[in-house]
């Protein structure tokens, strides 16, 4: 894939915590409006990879470019989020003490400065945007409930909703299907496919059925670097991948 | 509506509070004279002040045994200002306004006194302040029964000069107004006596300073300049124990570098093994070891009252003893507890002190006292090694300070001024 | 524009509190001055001053609640801002004494005279003007807060670490102001004030006036706090409190938000201090004592944090209890007070207001969602451990 | 004053000469003489009872003049304030307090002379000046004492007094002296005396060299004394010597600061180490920590007073008993607090701050009600009082012991946490309560014991701190802030951090203090901590990794 359409570009990224190499010379590309599934056993470095991309963790070495020019290693979470990278955590993290509506409102693309928010006035455009989002994530009925009272699955959805509200170019989604019923899982897969039409999406997932449902290119991480890449069928026939998963 | 309602509720609540404190008083108003006791029973100063509360209670009890005052019984009202200076002011106001006490005995630190001064001025009541202090003050409603600098510091320095031949001085103190002022006075005094500036070392430490290693070793160094050296300590009560422990262990003997302290009394020594400290000095107007009948009686009464014959007595207790008796006599003289009457009648009142002599209330609201220099003994007591032949008059305004050498205080008519400027010939303060 | 937020934020309890404050600002002075001593509803001056003091404490508590209850910053150093404001006012009052000091020096305060200072230190200039002093009372704490916060929040010092260094801050200031060389009167601080704005500081009228001022200041503080918390900024603050990293990943500069509310809170505390001093008649380094900051935290907890009304109630109640105990049972009041704190933490984890809230919880949740209705449910997410979100 | 000294010294000199001769010549006359002037001496001693300080001083000199070594014990007793006289017949006795009465001993024969009631005897008053006079008198009296320590003391006394007329006796004594150490002291004493004498310059130059060799403060003080004399050669030499002494001093000052820093650090360490468990490991913001220390100190007081009444002769062992006692008392109180309050607050650690603050108020007031608000005396056992000199470095024993003790406690705690099953449980529970519980660890028990351990350690610290600080209800308050600073500075949850933190702060403080003064030093250290936390938001020893920087 030529660098032009490349949205996210990792090259030789390494991170280590007190000796333990979480990422080991990791390199891969994500194209525009591409959806990519990332799989790998525990400790393969999936979450650390997200931390590095979103500026939560600084890489010890390696190159990290977004949208061609921006060097992500030089910015912090807030700025990176500003560039248009949204992230959903493994454990759904929403603002439990605020209403579903407010959760989305906070996420909406808007000025982020204290004074901007102090004098912020919510207008119709914003309200309708929130309504559509609520519809998309199927929480219209619970708009005024506290996010803390939602079910696990619903929290996942709300968080995805907040991602959409940010309207980022790239979504990093960590185990969206965790703790969901099959129905919800399927629905989530549809939703993500829908999203990927207009956004680039990176999904980290254990659930193979879900990954298959997404039907996208898969990158297998192992011990902090790429083990294999390609279609799910291709990688799942890969000898080394099997070894890693069956722990041979 | 709601508001009004709630408001009056608040009013009741408040009334309830005021009542609860004043209740006994309220219905006893007619037959008792109430005396306020304003000493910290908690917080950092409780260490020193609680004893004074007990002493006052004892004095009042004894007075009542003697038939009270003006045919009425005395009633003590105790409050706890908790070593919190603004709270002192609040409690003083409460004692006077709510409980209607005729006089207040209390305060220890200068700041607590400063904090209550305006209250007594405003509500025109009486405060008896029993602790040695920095002077530089004379207020119409306050009677200073503790020592002024000229009743403690100066004689002590004289003693060291003449008796011990000291030529080199360390003035060590806690960094607050009493040591600051006392050291200013002493510095001026010593220089007047021809002590060179390089022979005076002044050192200040924070409150409750507990690590004295550096300072003690500095003192040692300073003391090794070939001249007889002494330490004049205005270190605040609480920090003294670690100071003396360090001193004792560092092997600074009283014969080599004597330390004379102005805030170390029997109470403070009670916290120490005085074995290594024998010979270090303190200057007070009273020591428990003073052997006079009246003192023995006082000590016995104290032990009887506290039911503990190891409880020591100390100088501020004597100050309260004197102050209380002066107030009683002044009230009897005036035939009323009305502050103005008492303020007029108390000047000149003379009562026995515990050192065998008599103390008189002077027009500047300070009293006359003997000055005693004592050496620490290994039983935690002081032994008087020197005392003034006569009584010393408390000097409100030091003659050794620029600002105050022209000032005098005389609360008798016609002058009735706390800071009369003899130079300009007019009352320097609020009177003008 | 505030009004708009108020519509959202000024609900039941707060409305009552606001009305109460405004009313007492008028009524108490009235009941004190107009009615004769004998009258059953007469409020003695003693009580007026006392309540005035409580109200300034309440303002301090409110300021603290703004950062702790809504942004999860547990400050153990808010007394520092309070005291700074107090000193600014104290310096003004000191200058007002003029030549009525005991030494009759027209310029120098007494403590400078007997420490043989021959001229006024530069940082005392300007304090003879009330406006300037008031400005400093707000700006000095603001500057301290801004500088401190700028470093602390940028380097992401959170939770206990932050609490402890705020304590270090106030402790350092305590020691600094104890030093007589600082020129703030050392341990004795500033006292013996004569008059304020030309009014005799001891007259009942002035005291009543100061009370009214305190009540109004508190009311204003309440309005401001409501305006802030009801705005979107308020929602962001709560977001920061509950899930700091999440908020960051949403693109919010958390440190800026913390810095904003931290500074505002410091200014409120400063104002409280400035009103406190003329009513108690003294300001000294003791006000910087870490214990004072901790007590303020306790007021907030007792009243219920994260509910603007709670801290006000808490502050008044606890101090009322303190005044009462120290007189009613001087020997044992510490047992009572200590017991109260333990009791509140164990049995009223959400504070007095929280208790009332939880009662009407479900109802309220059906009617409309209120951002801070739940966080008083005691889930303290301000702790770093608590925040291991992802 | 000076003239008086002169007079006295000449007297002493005469006496000394006499002594030397007396001892040199065979002791045949010795006993006889003794018998004869026995009565005389006794009257002289009895005469001590009369008059004021000056009279007493004259008597002392007189006795010294008579120069009978048997007067020494009486003078010793006088200096120690144990010399009393019987009101009835003014007979002087060496006394020992025996209950409310006094046990009397004859001042010469030292035989028992029965007892006397408080009223029958009166103390002979002495003040510092008299004590000095006596010391010098004894000095020359005991130059030939059998005990070398006594001889050194005697020499030093002369050194301090610069007693010119002791030169001959000193030389005589030196000639006979075999013990090199004692000899050194005597030479120095002689040098000191020479400097005060009017001997020719060469002798004095030599003397300066001898004195300078001491290189300590006394030497310096002595040299400054003569450095401004008329004789140029002399005071050049003196100044040179002083310069030399001061160079040495400079080095020692650094050493001193380091030592002071270590000892302050060990105090901080002791104060903080319990908190490193309750706060560092368990995350309880334990405002009652200081009160645990206080409880320990008061336990020490109680134990000691038991010893005083029950077994005063074993007083030195009181601390050994106090340690476990304090650990138990504080530990049990700690467990009570944990069971009664803290366990309900696991999910809201910040509120432990409020509860424990309340507890601390209650504990303070309890102690105040039981023991009273005033300081309580906790004595130093003999092995903890006094000091030793390493070169010019005075190391006081109590400080030394506290440093050692702090390190021992630290090591013990480290072992307990790292090497024992209990420690394993503690770490497991604090890292993941639920999982530990599911793995069959009885988490409530572990919590209680951990808090108990932390509190117990604090109690032990109290025993040590009682040796250098007030034992008052406020004891705890004065340490709580410093403790938190140390733990946070070192990095919460890391024992090594606490150790390093304590010593860093201690030493920093002590190096700042001489420069900036005690107050500023403390402020600077606090500012330093604040800034440091900016650099390392999680303290000296921060754990890295995903789990933490959430």
Image: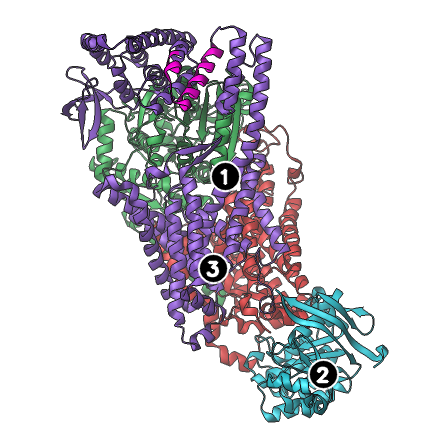
Chain colours: A cyan, B green, C red, D purple
Q: Please identify the quarter of the rendering in which residue C223 is found.
A: bottom right
Q: Is residue B93 above or below residue B314?
A: below
Q: Secondary structure at mark 1?
A: helix
Instruction: Find residue A186 and report its horizontal and vertical position in percent.
Output: 64, 92
Instruction: Find residue A89 and report its horizontal and vertical position in percent.
Output: 63, 77
- Which-is-in-front pick, marks 2 and 3? 2
| Nearer to us in this view, D99 or B68 | D99
Kindly identify which chain the residue marked by label 2 belongs to: A
> Which residue does the numbered mark 1 point to in the structure image?
D260
Q: Is residue A238 left or right of residue D10?
A: right
Residue D195 is covered by the magenta coloring: yes
- Which-is-in-front pick, marks 1 and 3? 1
Query: Which residues are the magenta region?
Result: D172-196
Q: Looking at the picture, do discs 1 and 2 lie on one chain?
A: no
| Nearer to us in this view, C212 or D537 | D537
> Which residue does the numbered mark 2 point to in the structure image?
A228
Instruction: Find residue C357 and report its horizontal and vertical position in percent.
Output: 49, 73
- From the image, give the main secondary structure of the stretch colored magenta: helix
């Amino acid at each position: 894939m030529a660098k032009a359409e490349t949205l996210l570009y990792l090259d030789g990224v390494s991170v280590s915590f007190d000796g333990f190499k979480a990422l080991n010379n990791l390199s891969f590309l994500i194209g525009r409006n591409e959806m990519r599934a990332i799989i790998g056993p525990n400790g393969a470095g999936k979450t650390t990879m997200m931390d590095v991309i979103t500026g939560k963790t600084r890489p010890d070495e390696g190159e990290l470019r977004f949208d061609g020019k921006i060097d992500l290693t030089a910015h912090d979470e807030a700025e990176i989020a500003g560039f248009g990278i949204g992230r959903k955590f493994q454990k759904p993290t929403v603002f439990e003490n605020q209403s579903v509506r407010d959760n989305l409102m906070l996420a909406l693309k808007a000025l982020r400065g204290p004074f901007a928010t102090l004098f912020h006035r919510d207008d119709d455009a914003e309200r309708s945007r929130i309504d559509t989002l609520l519809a998309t994530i199927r929480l219209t009925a619970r708009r005024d409930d506290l996010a803390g009272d939602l079910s696990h699955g619903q929290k996942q959805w709300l968080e995805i909703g907040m991602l959409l509200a940010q309207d980022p170019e790239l979504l990093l989604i960590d185990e969206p299907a965790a703790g969901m019923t099959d129905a919800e899982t399927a629905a989530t897969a549809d939703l993500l496919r829908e999203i990927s039409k207009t956004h680039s999406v990176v999904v980290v997932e254990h659930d193979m059925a879900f990954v298959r449902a997404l039907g996208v290119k898969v990158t297998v991480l192992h011990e902090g670097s790429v083990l294999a890449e390609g279609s799910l069928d291709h990688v799942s026939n890969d000898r080394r991948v099997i070894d890693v998963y069956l722990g041979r | 509506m709601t508001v009004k309602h709630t408001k009056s509720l608040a009013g009741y609540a408040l009334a309830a509070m005021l009542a609860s404190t004043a209740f006994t008083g309220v219905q006893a108003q007619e037959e008792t004279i109430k005396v306020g006791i304003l000493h910290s029973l908690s917080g950092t100063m409780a260490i020193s002040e609680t004893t004074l509360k007990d002493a006052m209670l004892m004095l009042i009890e004894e007075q009542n045994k003697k038939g009270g005052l003006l045919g009425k019984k005395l009633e003590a009202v105790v409050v706890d200002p908790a070593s919190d200076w603004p709270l002192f002011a609040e409690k003083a106001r409460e004692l006077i306004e709510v409980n209607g006490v005729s006089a207040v005995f209390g305060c220890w630190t200068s700041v607590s006194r400063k904090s209550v001064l305006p209250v007594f001025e405003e509500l025109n009541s009486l405060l008896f302040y029993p602790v040695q202090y920095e002077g530089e003050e004379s207020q119409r409603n306050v009677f200073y029964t503790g020592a002024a600098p000229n009743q403690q510091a100066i004689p002590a320095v004289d003693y060291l000069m003449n008796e011990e031949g000291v030529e080199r001085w360390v003035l060590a103190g806690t960094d607050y107004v009493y040591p600051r002022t006392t050291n200013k006075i002493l510095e001026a005094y010593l220089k007047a006596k021809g002590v060179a500036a390089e022979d005076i070392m002044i050192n200040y430490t924070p409150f409750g300073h507990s690590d004295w290693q550096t300072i003690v070793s500095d003192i040692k160094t300073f003391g090794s300049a070939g001249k007889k050296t002494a330490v004049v300590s205005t270190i605040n009560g609480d920090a003294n124990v670690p100071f003396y422990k360090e001193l004792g262990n560092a092997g600074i003997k009283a014969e080599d570098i004597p330390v004379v302290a102005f805030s170390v009394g029997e109470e403070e020594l009670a916290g120490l093994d005085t074995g290594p400290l024998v010979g270090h000095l303190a200057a007070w107007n009273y020591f428990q070891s003073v052997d006079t009948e009246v003192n023995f009686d006082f000590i016995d009464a104290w032990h009887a009252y506290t039911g503990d014959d190891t409880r020591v007595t100390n100088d501020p207790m004597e100050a309260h003893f004197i102050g209380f008796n002066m107030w009683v006599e002044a009230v009897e003289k005036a035939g009323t507890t009305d502050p103005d009457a008492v303020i007029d009648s108390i000047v000149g009142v003379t009562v026995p002190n515990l050192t065998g002599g008599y103390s008189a209330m002077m027009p500047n609201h300070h009293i006359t006292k003997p000055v005693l220099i004592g050496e620490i003994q290994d039983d935690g007591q002081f032994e008087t090694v020197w005392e003034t032949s006569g009584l010393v008059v408390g000097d409100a305004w030091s003659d050794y300070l620029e600002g105050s050498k022209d000032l005098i205080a005389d609360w008798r008519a016609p002058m009735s001024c706390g800071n009369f400027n003899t130079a300009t010939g007019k009352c320097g303060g609020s009177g003008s | 524009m505030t009004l708009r937020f108020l519509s959202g934020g000024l609900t039941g309890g707060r409305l009552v509190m606001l009305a109460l404050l405004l009313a007492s600002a008028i009524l108490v002075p009235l009941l004190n001055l107009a009615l004769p001593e004998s009258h059953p509803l007469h409020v003695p001056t003693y009580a007026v001053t006392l309540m005035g003091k409580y109200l300034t404490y309440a303002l301090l508590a409110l300021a603290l609640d703004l950062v702790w209850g809504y942004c999860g910053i547990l400050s153990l150093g808010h007394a520092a801002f309070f005291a700074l404001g107090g000193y600014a006012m104290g310096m003004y009052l000191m200058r007002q004494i003029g030549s009525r000091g005991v030494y009759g020096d027209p310029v120098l305060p007494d403590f400078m005279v007997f420490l043989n200072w021959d001229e006024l230190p530069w940082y005392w200039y300007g304090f003879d003007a009330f406006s300037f002093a008031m400005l400093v009372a707000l700006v000095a704490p603001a500057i301290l807060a801004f500088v401190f916060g700028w470093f602390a929040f940028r380097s992401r010092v959170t939770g206990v670490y932050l609490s402890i260094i705020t304590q270090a801050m106030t402790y350092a200031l305590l020691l600094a102001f104890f030093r007589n060389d600082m020129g703030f009167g050392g341990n004795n601080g500033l006292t013996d004030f004569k008059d304020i704005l030309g009014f005799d500081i001891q007259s009942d009228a002035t005291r009543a006036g100061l009370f009214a001022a305190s009540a109004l200041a508190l009311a204003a503080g309440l309005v401001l706090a409501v305006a802030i918390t009801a705005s979107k900024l308020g929602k962001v603050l709560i977001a920061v409190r509950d899930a700091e990293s999440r908020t960051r990943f949403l693109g919010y500069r958390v440190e800026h938000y913390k810095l904003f509310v931290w500074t505002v809170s410091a200014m409120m505390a400063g104002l409280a201090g400035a009103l406190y001093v003329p009513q108690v008649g003294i300001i000294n380094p003791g006000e910087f004592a870490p214990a004072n900051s901790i007590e303020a935290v306790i007021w907030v907890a007792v009243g219920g944090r994260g509910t603007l009304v709670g801290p006000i109630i808490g502050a008044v109640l606890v101090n009322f209890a303190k005044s009462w105990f120290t007189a009613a049972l001087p020997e044992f009041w510490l047992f009572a007070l200590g017991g109260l704190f333990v009791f509140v933490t164990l049995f009223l984890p959400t504070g007095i207001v929280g208790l009332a809230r939880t009662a009407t919880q479900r109802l309220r949740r059906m009617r409309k969602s209120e951002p801070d209705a739940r966080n008083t449910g005691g889930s303290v997410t301000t702790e770093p451990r608590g925040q291991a979100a992802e | 004053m000076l003239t008086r000294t002169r007079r006295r010294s000449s007297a002493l000199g005469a006496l000394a000469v006499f002594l030397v001769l007396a001892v040199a010549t065979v002791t045949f006359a010795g006993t006889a003489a003794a018998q004869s002037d026995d009565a005389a001496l006794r009257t002289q001693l009895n005469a001590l009872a009369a008059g004021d300080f000056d009279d007493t001083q004259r008597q002392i000199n007189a006795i010294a003049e008579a120069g009978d070594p048997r007067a020494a014990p009486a003078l010793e007793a006088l200096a120690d304030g144990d010399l009393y006289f019987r009101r009835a017949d003014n007979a002087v006795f060496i006394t020992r307090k025996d209950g409310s009465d006094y046990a009397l001993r004859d001042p010469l024969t030292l035989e028992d002379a029965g007892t006397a009631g408080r009223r029958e005897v009166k103390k002979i008053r002495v003040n510092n000046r008299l004590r000095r006079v006596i010391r010098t008198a004894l000095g020359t009296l005991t130059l030939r004492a059998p005990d070398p320590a006594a001889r050194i003391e005697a020499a030093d006394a002369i050194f301090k007094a610069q007693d010119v007329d002791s030169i001959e006796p000193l030389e005589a004594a030196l000639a006979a002296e075999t013990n090199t150490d004692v000899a050194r002291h005597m030479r120095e004493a002689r040098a000191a005396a020479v400097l005060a004498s009017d001997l020719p310059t060469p002798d004095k130059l030599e003397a300066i060299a001898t004195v300078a060799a001491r290189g300590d403060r006394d030497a310096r003080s002595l040299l400054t004394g003569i450095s401004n004399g008329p004789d140029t050669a002399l005071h050049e030499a003196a100044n040179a010597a002083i310069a030399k002494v001061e160079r040495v001093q400079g080095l020692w000052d650094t050493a001193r600061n380091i030592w002071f820093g270590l000892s302050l650090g060990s105090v901080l360490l002791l104060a903080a180490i319990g908190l490193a468990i309750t706060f560092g490991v368990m995350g309880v913001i334990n405002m009652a920590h200081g009160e645990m220390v206080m409880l320990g100190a008061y336990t020490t007081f109680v134990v000691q007073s038991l010893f005083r009444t029950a077994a005063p002769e074993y007083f030195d062992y009181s601390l050994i008993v106090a340690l476990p006692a304090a650990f138990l008392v504080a530990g049990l109180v700690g467990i009570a607090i944990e069971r009664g309050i803290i366990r309900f607050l696991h999910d809201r650690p910040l509120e432990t701050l409020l509860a424990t603050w309340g507890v601390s108020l209650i504990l303070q007031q309890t102690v105040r009600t039981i023991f009273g608000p005033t300081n309580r005396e906790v004595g130093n056992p003999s092995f903890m009082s006094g000091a030793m000199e390493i070169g010019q470095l005075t190391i006081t024993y109590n400080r030394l012991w506290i440093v050692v003790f702090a390190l021992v406690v630290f090591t013990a705690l480290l072992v307990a946490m790292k090497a024992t099953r209990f420690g394993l449980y503690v770490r497991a529970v604090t890292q993941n309560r639920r999982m530990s519980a599911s793995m069959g660890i009885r988490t409530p028990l572990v919590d209680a014991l951990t808090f108990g351990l932390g509190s117990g350690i604090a109690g032990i610290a109290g025993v040590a701190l009682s040796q250098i600080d007030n034992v008052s209800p406020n004891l705890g308050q004065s340490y709580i802030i410093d403790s938190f600073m140390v733990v946070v500075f070192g990095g919460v949850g890391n024992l090594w951090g606490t150790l390093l933190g304590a010593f860093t702060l201690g030493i920093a403080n002590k190096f700042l203090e001489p420069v900036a003064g005690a107050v500023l030093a403390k402020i600077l250290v606090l500012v330093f901590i604040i800034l440091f936390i900016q650099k390392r938001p999680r303290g000296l020893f921060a754990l890295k990794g995903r789990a933490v920087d959430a």
